Image (cartoon, helix red, strand yellow):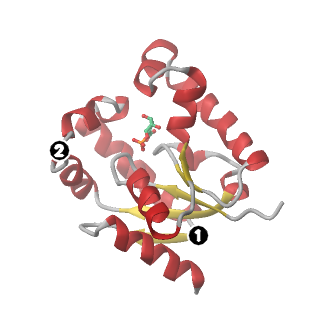
């Protein structure tokens, strides 16, 4: 099967889910989110999976999710958890689009949202901001390397990011 998916990767809080929904609003492409798929499968919140079974178990669930996406999903926009980019078969799922932003801009984005507290609380790897910054720095090069397309999203509206993705993919 020729894959026609778009996979949005990038750090926690950069707006992958929001951009996926903006793409749906733009052209009706359905979207799914790997964290939502895992929560729905396990009937457990990501935060609780980390707490009860540990990060390694969560990564194994992400791997299962990647296999399912390859086997079963096409013509879909897939927003991913911030660590999903590590999946070896990422490119087999579709075109990889990295939503890029500095760490400070990500924090600004989260803190200026109406439910900032909730956004922080639900993310186990954002509990300690110093650690989160280290994680960000350790991932930046890898995000860029695996991407087919890099879009800087700082202070841009989701609908403009959605349009930019399509105009650049068409080229
Ligand atoms: C993670 C990002 C989270 C979620 C989990 C781990 C990561 O998703 O998958 O908490 O390793 O960066 P978001 O990027 O949607 O916050």
Q: Is residue 131 left or right of residue 145?
A: left
The yes-or-no answer for disc 1 within 8 Å of ligand 1 is no
The picture quadrant where one finds residue 103 is bottom left
Q: CA distance from mark 2 to mark 1?
A: 32 Å
Name the one closer to the observer, 115 or 131: 115
Which residue is found at the position 64% from the left and 45% from the top?
87
Label number found at residue 33? none
The yes-or-no answer for disc 2 within 8 Å of ligand 1 is no
Farthest residue, direction bottom: 171
Q: Secondary structure at mark 2?
A: loop
Label number found at residue 114? 2
Label number found at residue 148? 1
Q: Secondary structure at mark 1?
A: loop
Which residue is found at the position 28% from the left and 66% from the top?
154
User: Answer yes or no: do the residues labelled 2 and 1 have beta carbons within 8 Å?
Assistant: no
> Residue 28 location, x and y as percent?
53, 64
Name the one closer to the observer, 137 or 171: 171
Farthest residue, direction right: 1
> Residue 66 location, x and y as percent?
67, 43
Image quarter for ligand 1 equals: top left
Name the one closer to the observer, 77 or 24: 24
């Amino acid at each position: 099967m020729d894959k026609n998916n778009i996979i949005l990767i990038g750090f926690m809080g950069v707006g992958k889910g929001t951009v996926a929904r903006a793409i749906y609003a733009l052209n009706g492409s359905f979207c799914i989110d790997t964290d939502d798929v895992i929560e729905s499968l396990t009937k457990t919140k990501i935060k609780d999976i980390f707490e009860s079974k540990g990060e390694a178990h969560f990564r194994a669930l992400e791997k299962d999710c990647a296999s399912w996406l390859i086997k079963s999903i096409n013509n879909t926009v897939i927003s991913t958890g911030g660590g999903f980019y590590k999946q070896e078969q990422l490119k087999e799922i579709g075109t990889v689009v990295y939503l890029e932003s500095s760490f400070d801009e990500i924090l600004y984005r989260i803190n200026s949202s109406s439910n900032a507290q909730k956004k922080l609380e639900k993310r186990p790897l954002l509990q300690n901001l110093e650690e989160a910054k280290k994680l960000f720095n350790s991932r930046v090069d890898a995000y860029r390397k695996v991407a087919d397309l890099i879009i800087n999203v700082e202070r841009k509206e989701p609908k403009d990011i959605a349009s930019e993705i399509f105009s650049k993919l068409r080229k």
